[in-house]
Image (spheres, rainbow, N blue to C red):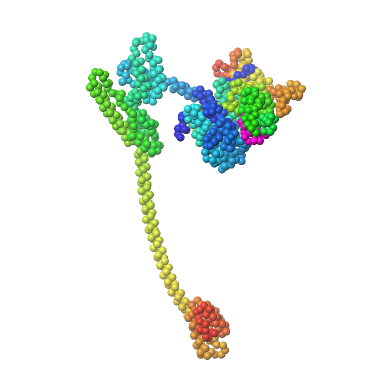
Amino acid sequence: MTSVQINLPLPVLPQGWAGEKDFKSVGQLSQANDRNIEPVGPHFLAHARRKRHKRTFSEDDRIQAQANVKKVEDDDAGEISEPEDPLMLQREAKDWKGQDHYAVLGISRYRWKATEDQIKRAHRKKVLKHHPDKKAAAGGTEDDQFFKCIQKATEVLSDPVKRRQFDSVDEAADVEPPSKKEAQKGNFYKLWGKVFEAEGRFSKKQPVPKLGNEKSSKPEVENFYNFWYDFDSWRTFEYLDEDVPDDNENRDQKRHVERKNQNARRKKKTEDTARLRKLVDDCLGTDERIKLFRQQEHAQKNKRRFEKEAEQKRLAEEATKAKEEQAKLTAEKEAAEKAEKAEGKKAKEAAKNAAKKNKRVVRAAVKEANYFHSGGDAPAAQIDSALNDVDLIITKIDNEELAALTSKLNGKKGAGDITAIFKDEAKRLVGAGKLKEGETKSLA
Amino acid sequence: MSAENDPAQRVAIGISFGNSYSSIAFTTGDGKAEVIANEDGDRQIPSILSYVSGEELHGGQAKSQLLRNSKNTVAYFRDFLGQEFKSIDPSPCHQSAHPVDHESSIAFKIQDTEEDKENTVTVSEVTTRHLKRLRNSASDYLGKSVNAAVITVPTNFAEAQKTALNKAAKEAGIEVLQFINEPVAAVLAYDARPDAKLADKILVVADLGGTRSDIAVVASRGGIYTFLATIHDYEVSGFVLDQVLIDHFAKEFLKKHKSAGDPRENDRSLAKLKLECEAVKKALSIGTSANFSVESLAGGVDFTSTVNRSRYDLLANKHFTAFARLVTHAVEKAQLDPLDISEIILAGGNSHTPKAASALAYAFPESTTVLAPSTSPTAINPSELSVRGAAIQASLIQEFELEDIEQSTHPMVTVTPHLSHAVGVLCISADESSGIFNPIIDAETPLPVRRTAIIATPREGGDVLIKLAEGLRHIKITKPEPKAKTEKEPSSDDDSDEDSEEEEERREKTWKVGTVLSEAALKGIKKGGKVEVQINISADLAVNAIFREVGGKGGVRGILQGGKTTQNGSA
């Protein structure tokens, strides 16, 4: 925000004005309105940054300025700022095989990660600096050896095939695997991660899975190790070949050297595969996650076993419990039956007694009813038949009916009443089919 | 999925999704927004989808299907998104597929497959298809798969509508970085121009769209925008302007061919008439006259006619004044005076019409700049304003994590205290009645704020008094002559008396001195020296002021804490 320009002059300080340290506060601001500002535009972003990080204007200005400065440096620095080793500048172009092409171009911090564009720019910068014409103009010698080195380096690095050959043997890009002690200090993932990142450059399959960290899931970790045990490398060792002599000198010699080279390549390749295998073994051996997974698996298995056992135990317990319950039930049942039996006997006895008593009452009632004879003393025959009839009735009816009959007869004194009761009873029995019509003559 | 949410992999564009037209834009490496044309070469892509025997047509091609295949053409569906059937106004869809109620949302019954049966397609599905087409157009143009966007929405877009739009966008493969309000996008498009100066101003964004018009009063303070008032109107729109032309040409047609019948009574004729009238309207924005020509308009009769701009202006004058009135209402709603408005930004397709701009220029004082193609040669195409703003915003935030964006747009950050009165210094005289107040920080400035002012001193230098005060804006009305009562200008009958009276009076924006905040003395200013005043106001209304001579050492520092003074000292 540019500052406001006010062209009207300020008033002259009145006479006698005084304030502590030339400042005097008089009033205060009116209450502010709360409004929603629109979250849009660069200035809002600045506002949000200040508010979220609780910065004041000047703090924010300073931090932003620093951030911007750093960015510029990063952009500019890069490939040019690498110091040149004076020994490297002395190199002879004919020894190009031994030179570090990346260092020659000043991009040794990128190495195999350097893009084509970076290589091109680096080359241009180096050429501008080391061109023989420039050296001559500066009064130097006609020495163009280092310039030739630069050209050679560019030739190798800008040809994808040659660059791969060089990268294959570029030991400076290798990362030494950490020792057991180093890895144990808690930076296992950091140290080994770098190793595998560097090794991953040889992979034909891209992208290469990352080592991850202690939170990686089991499939991730398994995928990582499977990848490295199945590693498909494009690494070759042609670059280290011995020079094949010119063909017109000696054909045999040439073929011999060629064969030697082939063998050497094969041998180096096998060694490299073995080396990588050992590397992965070492890493796997000290990987805490594998141990953890194994423990978890073990725990899982144990858990399953424990569960099974517990289940069996529970089943057995249930079975015994059921058996006990069964036994208890039978015992109770038996006891109840026994008690019932005894009770039944008693009841029967009582019923018998009651029946006897009832019969007596009934017979007595017959007597009371004057053997159903109307008027005067009953003749013997009448008595006989009446008693027989009553006995017949008694035999035909069961105990309960007898009891009912008895209750009816109880208290009845009149001969007519009693006779009527007996008649009713006889009729009822006839009705029930237990007695034939006319069988009880005395009650007819 | 992780790649899509990774800010580094993001390819973000701006999308302006309107009821009638949509557009897409991206930001070039040097920070300039560029609007992308689709395969047909359209920069304003009609928000229309049409289905012809299973084939999906989009944009301009779909629009022409409104004639032949209106039943299977979906148009004007943006405002239906996330709404319930009972709360929508389906009238714009009269000539396309009609919306129907479907499971508490809205759907269209269309034949979108080769089979001869009607499918129910929900409005969110339609939106997804539309956005997918936009995304494809942008991806084809950029050569990179677009996976994120900033989308502009009207200020009255409810949360449910935003959620529905977000979902539809996600299904179309677009991660919505942020929804921004259309008026702010328009302001941003203007402020992002390389030659734009950052000034404190109050502006009005007047969007005259196809189906609705939206007015927003925005305070812009140091590049931070605050809405002071918004008005939405569904009566004043491009539709009624089309209707004016439709009626005009229908009458012309009837005059010549009485027997052919009224083209407005036949659906197909009406559709033809409507399409052509829209084209005529656009042509009239550029040229002073336009040809109208439709083959077989009604009853097999071809019809050709011309209309000139002044005729159209006259016919549609009613609607343009209504539009200008709407803008003045919005200003009133914000409790401001037309004099407070320093800029009016015209947005929306219909703002190309010169009369729309001139009607506004007439209603506002001369101090107000109307930014429209007809009034200002530097104006940005009004149809592209919001999409440009969206593209700029997209380029600003595309590197941030979504979580970061959400946190930054949280009310915790956006709700800010705003100054209720301007703060400034008294010049010429320290006396409150005779001194002239000069604002340094305007009212409605969000806090915290830091502003610097350079103030002149008396010619001979010496000791000066710097008096900080609050200022109250006052509109001074002076009536020059009593005969001002008579109406001078033969303005149209719609113009109210009030308007014409305003023309007669001299209205000025002046300041009244409010509460005096502090006094400070700077001694021994050199001859012709200047004084620099820096004011910091924090969110709790504490004022921290630094007074020093430009180029001089030391100075005076004073602090007013939260309204109460507790401490002061020398800086």
Q: Residue furthest right?
A: B483
| Quarter residue A276 falls in | top left
Q: What residue do we see at 36% from left, 51% from top?
A: A309
Q: Which residues are magenta?
A: B261-277
Q: What residue do we see at 30% from left, 18% from top?
A: A95
Using the rendered image of the protein, determine whether residue B84 is visible from the camera's viewpoint.
no
Judged by its main secondary structure, the magenta piece is helix
Report the number of numbered marks: 0
Up/down of B562 relative to A88, above or below: below
Q: Nearer the viewer, residue A314 or B486?
A: B486
Residue B80 x %, y %: 58, 37
Q: What residue do we see at 53% from left, 25% from top?
A: B34
Q: Nearer the viewer, residue B89 or A12?
A: B89
Using the rendered image of the protein, determine whether residue B499 is visible from the camera's viewpoint.
yes
Q: Is residue B51 left or right of residue B481?
A: left
Q: Is residue B533 left or right of residue B503?
A: left
